[in-house]
Image (tube, helix red, strand yellow):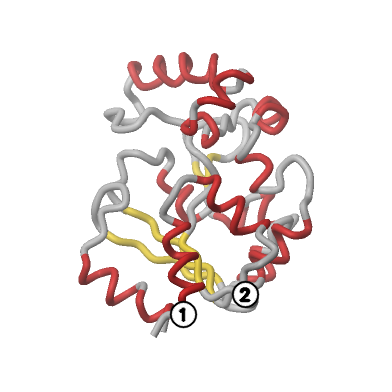
Amino acid sequence: MASPGSLWLLAAALLPWSCHARALGHPDLPLPLPLVIWHGMGVFGFPRCPGESSHICDFIRKILNAAAYSKVVQERLVQAEYWHDPIKEDVYRNHSIFLADINQERSVNESYKKNLMGLKKFVMVKFLNDSIVDPVDSEWFGFYRSGQAKETIPLQETTLYTKDHLGLKEMDKAGKLVFLGTEGDHLQLSQAWFYAHIIPFLE
């Protein structure tokens, strides 16, 4: 049976990113932490936009990009905290008030790394028909190759992994990373799938 702490972490993982920040920096959580479900290299696309080749999608992306990193938008719009421009990585790192911090892309907070590495398993769920997260590989900590927005690379080829600022490389070698995929749109989990694939990690 899952402990209250593991259930709390699971619930927090399904809430916005600020909860992840509290979980990673929280001094009172029991260690080793049992489980968290988290996706997180950010987004660089408009939800439910019809395809990468659509000129409309690219136009909307440019409009969003023009304002996403302004101080006012970053502080008032949660969605902007997820915005990750792979073409202008320096702008993203310097002006993202949340994602660049939690992913240790601007500076390293050792407590984030320590607490994340305290997990018994780091379970990442990719929703294979996700129309909200773009690119969907972000749900497994993959992302666009830096400098463009067409080709994606897996976690293992990212700077986050090779420099190991979050401890993901070390966790991978220790067998702590779990990559799960399920059919369906954003957060569309059937109860049967949840009980078959997630509950075992909480027992």
Answer above or below: position of 32 versus 39: below
Nearest to the observer: residue 33 or residue 86: 33
Q: Along the horizontal axis of the image, is 203 left or right of 35?
A: left
Answer above or below: position of 95 versus 9: above
Q: Amino acid at mark 1?
A: Ser
Numbered-mark total: 2
Q: Provide residue 39's location: percent of width, then percent of height.
A: 48, 53
- Residue shown at the point (40%, 14%) measured from the top left: 59
State the separation of the CA atoms marked 1 and 2: 11 Å
- Residue shown at the point (77%, 52%) measured from the top left: 109
Q: SS for tag 2? A: loop
Q: Amino acid at mark 2?
A: Pro
Q: Which residue is mark 1?
A: 3
Which quarter of the figure is the C terminus placed in? bottom left
Disc 2 packing (10 Å; few <14; some 14–19; many ≥20): few
Q: Provide residue 129's location: percent of width, then percent of height.
A: 27, 48
Q: Are marks 1 and 2 in contact (CB under 8 Å)?
A: yes
> What number is the disc on residue 30?
2
> What number is the disc on residue 82?
none
Q: Earlier in the sequence, mark 1 or mark 2?
A: 1
Which quarter of the figure is the N terminus placed in? bottom left
Disc 1 packing (10 Å; few <14; some 14–19; many ≥20): few
Q: Provide residue 187's location: percent of width, then percent of height.
A: 31, 52
Q: Provide residue 178's location: percent of width, then percent of height.
A: 48, 70
